[in-house]
Amino acid sequence: MVRMKKHAGDWAFDIFNFLLMTFLCFITVYPFLYLLSLSFTSGDVPLTQNYIIPPKVTLDNYAKVLTNSDIGNGFIMTIARTLLGTAISLVCTVCTAYPLSKKYFVHRNLFTSFVVITMFVSGGTIPSYLLVKSIGLMDTIWALVLPGAISAYNVVICRNFFMGIPDSLEESARIDGANDIIILFRIILPVSLPIIATLTLWVAVANWNAWFDSLIYITTSRKQVLQVVMRRIVLEGTQEMMNPDPELEAMLVNPETIKATTVMVTTLPILCVYPFIQKYFVKGVMVGSLKG
Amino acid sequence: MRVKTSTVSLSTGRKRGLSQSIYWKQRYLLLLFLPAIAYFIIFHYIPLYGVIIAFKDYKFNEGILGSPWVGLEHFRMLFGMESFWQVFRNTIIIGFWKLVFGFPAPILFALFLNEVQHSTPKKIVQTISYLPHFVSWVIMGGILTQLLSPSTGPINIALKAMGFEPIYFLADPKWFRGVLVASHVWKSIGWGSIVYFAALSSVDQEIYEAAMIDGAGRFQRMFRITIPEITPVITIMLILAAGSLIKDDFDQVFNLYNSNVLSVGDVLSTYTYRAGLVDMEYSFATAVELFKNVISVTLVLLTNFASKRINDYGIW
């Protein structure tokens, strides 16, 4: 880099730019900070002033929210669907992608189109809902994990990765008489950890954040995922509500701080992990834009 | 299997038994692929076929096949409804303003962040800017409800301190679309800038050095070098974004709207949801969704066509 003396204009620009970036970071983080602060605020503080450090700090809100059985059930349901959904999705994606990565796979082009078409056309909400209803998945965890189990996009990404693995790696195993299934799990998967990790994170975060399927497919309120429980507590009164729950009503004596705590309980897991996993998602955007 | 085997042997001109057929040789690959065939047929192709209920009077007891055909009855009803056209207008207007503000914002953000000289603050700002992308609209709905509350929300407390009347952002038809557009920009500015960042990092640094020696200032370099260099990417992204005019954001609207702002905030996807899953007018709702999907696919095809022409004949 050529060393240049800085102009006065450059200094002004840098200062302006610094202020702009600080401002952008502030407005991005502020809503979360505000709710975090509110969640530690004691219930008897009147909410008529803005502050970041609460005048009276308390953990009561968290104690109340975390011992609430709806929130507890919601947590269990969300964790269950994330684990089950991610496991099913990964196994199915890998098993679909591997045959498609083989140039000699019979009807390869036909099967590839069969998968890829689903990226562009879909039946939509209502036909999918009617399908789930008619095959008896309503109100079960299967309604949350099965309909989205395989994403054509993930299959294509995974297939492309497999195609980059040299054939020579498989050859000795083939000579020893290993079949494709053994080769996939013993030889291909161990060298595919980068793509496995990426897909795992994509699917897991999507499962953690999913809520609409639970809202329409789960009819028992105690089986709802965390996000839907939170929605019921926080947006209550401002929107058409499902069955009001006496236990929730009792909790809402001091609504604002409890609502804020509920939101924080739902958000904190994502807030804590996203800085470490975001690079895997950035990769996904790049792959997508190269393709498009 | 047998029939297919024989056609294979005919076409290759060799006699093969089942054990010699290509299907048998690849039985393990086919076995691996079998769950995918079942999955895509059940969860994608059957619902795709189910779209025909838009032309039927669907009754759950009679199933998709048994329900009587009604032709274009649902579409006739739909196009005759003033409420539908209101929803259609809302969708386009909200989509238009989201495009006007939401499209340039990530470009500007990438441009200015690119001017930050040190890599550590750059990375920190970038990571912070991705934060809203990882938070679902349900949570955002909860956050915005509290942030914009007329009695306890910090924005209204600040407004009151400055002597203004509090504003009920989420329940006032004058403000609701603004909230949708602003929160959309807020949520997508960081994530949307990734593509532009990649484009910026591939710009040849020597051009800048030459410009600096010639005495070009920061703004001059930005407007004379950086923007022209990433114009191809901007053009492609703009073409792709055109489809978003009709693709409303269900998650966003559904978690923010309420009966007070239905007249300005109701969009096609929320309308479909209420018609289909609340009022259980399955056929009618499918017709609305089909109408939207047809427009959306047409827009995508048109824009793909346009981008191909531009790429082939080269505007730049």
Image (cartoon, coloured by chain):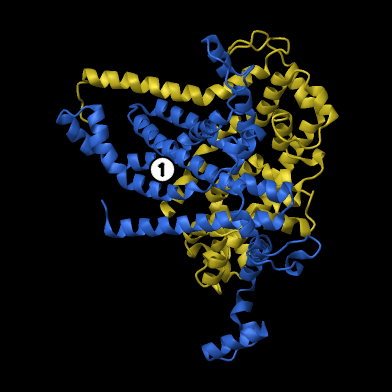
Chain colours: A yellow, B blue
The residue positioned 34% from the left and 33% from the top of the image is B111
Give me the residue at 39% from left, 32% from top.
B109
Q: Is residue B172 above or below residue A50?
A: below
- Snapshot quadrant of residue B224: top left
Q: Does residue B170 appear in the picture of this structure?
A: yes
Above or below for B46 versus B281? below
Query: Badge 1, how many Cα within 10 Å: few under 14, some, many 20+?
Result: many
Residue A259, percent across and down?
70, 24
Which residue ends up furthest to the top in the rendered image? A55
- x, y percentage for residue A237? 73, 28
Residue A172 appears in the picture as rendered: no
Instruction: Using the image, determine if residue B87 lies above or below residue B69.
Output: above
Q: Chain of mark 1?
A: B
What is the secondary structure assignment of the residue under circle 1?
Answer: helix
- Relative side of B65 to B126, left or right: right
Q: Nearer the viewer, residue B225 or B172?
A: B172
Q: Could you tell me residue B266's position as x and y percent?
A: 60, 41
Quarter of the image with the C terminus of chain A is bottom left
Where on the picture, by quarter, is residue B285?
A: bottom right
Amino acid under label 1?
Val
The number of numbered badges drawn on the structure is 1
Residue under circle 1?
B195
Residue A47 place in picture, x, y as percent: 65, 12
The N terminus of chain A sits in image quarter: top left
Residue at the outermost right position: A246
